[in-house]
Amino acid sequence: MKRVSLIVVTFALASFLGLVTSANAQEFQASYKQYEVGPIATGGASIFTGTVPDGAKTDIQLAYTAGVFADYMFNKNFGVGLGLGYESRGVFFKAQGSDTPNHKETIGYLSLQPSFKIKSFMLGADINLPLSGTAKHDNGLGVVSSSIGKDSMGTLIDVRASVFLPLVENDKGNLDFLIQAAYCLTDFFGDPGRQFSGIQTSADIVKKSPVPTVQIGFTYLFSPGGPVYEKR
């Protein structure tokens, strides 16, 4: 009887030790990068979705962003991110039925992008402070370029969504393919708006001028502290 009891106790102890060992092995299988920081570069299109002047047409323009991005993960699912960089967007108008006259404006911004991160998905704001702008007007006889004063540039505030798709991943960092889209809550044109001589057929001043963007690109995020292992 004692032998049976000893076998039962030994089996129970072995089973317990096996479970503990298994649990300890599994707890190191779930890991995440707590700190990440690195360069980011994206390019795509911006399109004017505001009030198109009477007698004019609009078209998509180049948009791009370059800067640095950092994130901090509270756990493997949730964290916060912050991007800082330079962003460029543009608008274009031409007379209906003709390539000229036409008018193009390009503005560069200091872009600040705070976000909430859920695994590889981010949702946040994009605060774009205007730095410089250039206008090019083609009346059919030649192109006239001029600078745009800061008073005529609007601060762009967006809602931005981004997805990080890992391409190469190791303990020291990740190379990610990035897709992001920004929807404007404010206007591209500052006060008092714009009129486009020779293009629009009315004297209306264009004020409603959101310019959303869709961009794709790459980022390499270094992981200074390496992966963090958590229990499942």
Image: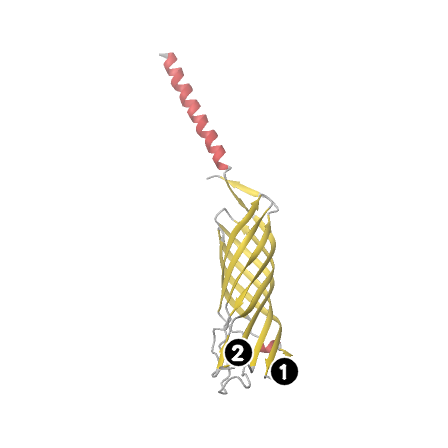
Using the image, determine if residue 155 lies above or below residue 166.
below
User: Mark 1, residues whose alpha carbon is within 10 Å: few (<14), some, or many (≥20)?
Assistant: few
Q: Earlier in the sequence, mark 1 or mark 2?
A: 2
SS state under label 2: strand
Place of residue 157 in the rendered image (x, y in percent of width and height, measured from the top left): 52, 68
Q: Are marks 1 and 2 in contact (CB under 8 Å)?
A: no
The location of residue 36, given as percent across then percent down, is 58, 50
Please say if 230 is above or below 185. above
Taking the spot 55% from the left edge, 66% from the top edge, the residue there is: 127
**Residue for badge 2:** 93
- Mark sitting on residue 142: 1
Q: Which amino acid is tagged 2?
A: Phe
Residue toward you, 4 or 99: 99
* Of residues 173 and 151, the one drawn nearer to the viewer in this rendering: 173
Name the image quarter holding the N terminus.
Answer: top left
Which residue occupies the foreground of this view, 161 or 137? Answer: 137
Task: Name which residue type carries label 1.
Answer: Gly
In the visual, does 69 lie left or right of 181? right
Expressed as whole percent of the image width and height from the top left, the position of residue 25 reads 49, 33
Judge by depth and name the residue closer to the eye, 6 or 15.
15
Q: Secondary structure at mark 1?
A: loop
